[in-house]
Image (cartoon, grey):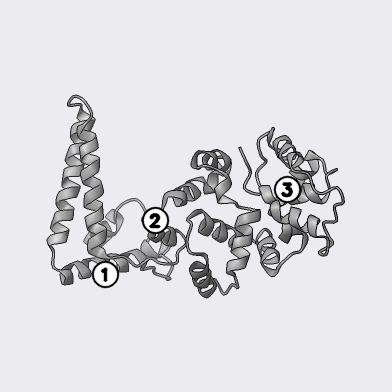
Amino acid sequence: MRHPAEYYLRALIIRDPSTTDAQLLRELDQKGFLEPQQSYLGFLRQELGATPPPQVFQPFNKLHRPSMQYLRDQQVYEMFFPTSGIEEAQSYLADPDKRMQVEQVIMARLDIRAVATKLNRKHGWFLTEDGISSYRHFFWNLKLLTFDQWGRYLYERSSLYDRYMSLLQADAKLALFHLRLDQTIDSKRMISRAQEIAYFALEEVNQVPGVRADKVKAIGILSKSITDCHNALSTSDMALSGVLKEFERFRVEHHLQSPQTIHQLSPTNNYTGSGVDVEDKEKAH
C-alpha cells in the first residue's frame, strides 16, 4: 500500500540516496504522518532504482537540463526549487487547524479555489489554490490509495476516521456542512430526503425473514417516520417555517445566568422534606 506523502519521500531519497529508512520514518513522524507498511520504503527505493537519475546528476542546477527533466519526471521538481505554493503547503504541517481543513477539502474533492475563498473569509486565513494543490500532491495525495486503502491508513487516526472516510463518498453539500461552510438547507427537501431514507430502510427491514419482535418494532418505527414526514410535507410553508424557527430558537438558546444554589432554592434548609416542616409551622401559627 502506498503512502499519501509518497512524493515528499521520493524527494528526500533523490536528494540524499544514503538516507536510511529510520531517518525517513522519523521525518514522517515529526510531520505528523502515520508510518507506512513495513515493506513500503523498500518498494519505493526499488521503484526509484528502476528509473535512476542521469549519470551526471545536478539536482540543484537549473541549467542542467537532464537533471531538471528527471526531477519533473519524478514529479518532485518543486521540492528542489520551492514555490510559494510549496512553502504554504509546508506551513500547514505546523498548523493543525489549517491542516485538518485542507485535508478535508482534498478528501471531499471540492473545488479548491472556491472553498479556499470561503475558508479565508470565515477564519481570516490566506489559503491559496497553489498551496492546497501542492499539499495534495506532496503530502496528501488522494489518488495514490484506493478507498479501502484509505480506510486501512486512517484506521489508526480514530478521531478523524469516520469524518475523513465519509468525505470520500460525500456530495459537495455534505462536505461543505462538515467544513461548517454552508449549512443552509431547503426544509421541504430535507424532510423529503428523511422520508426517502426511512422508506428504503423499511424495504430493507422487510427483507429479513420471519416476524421477529425486533423486525415488527422496526417496521412500526419506520412506518411512523414515513407518516410523520408525509404530514410535515403537507403542512403549509408558513406553518412549517414557524416550526423550524421554533426548533432553531430552542437549539441555540442559552441562558448565561447561573442556576440558583440549593440554599437559594431552599432557604429554610429543608432539602429533602418537600416543605413538610414549613407546612407544620404555618399550621401552628
Most distant residue in the top direction: 210
Q: Residue at x 57, y 75 (%)?
A: 124
Displayed quadrant of residue 184:
bottom left
Q: Is residue 88 above or below residue 212?
A: below
Q: Whole-percent x and y of residue 251?
A: 34, 64
Displayed quadrant of residue 120:
bottom right
Which sits in the foreground, 149 or 58? 58
The mark nearer the N terminus, 1 or 3, is: 3
Instruction: Write down the residue under mark 1.
Output: 245
Q: Amino acid type of disc 3?
A: Arg
Q: Whole-percent x and y of residue 244?
A: 25, 66
Q: Whole-percent x and y of residue 178?
A: 44, 58
User: CA gap, disc 2 to disc 3?
Assistant: 33 Å
Which sits in the foreground, 166 or 256? 166
Q: Amino acid type of disc 2?
A: Asp
Residue 257 seen in the figure: yes
Instruction: Determine whether label 2 and label 3 are within 8 Å by CB.
Output: no
- Element carrying mark 3: helix
Q: Whole-percent x and y of residue 202?
A: 21, 40
- Element carrying mark 2: loop
Instruction: Write down the residue under mark 3.
Output: 10
Q: Which tag is nearer the camera, tag 1 or tag 3?
A: 3
Label 1 crowd bin: few (<14), some (14–19), many (20+), radius 10 Å = few
Instruction: Write down the residue under mark 2.
Output: 171
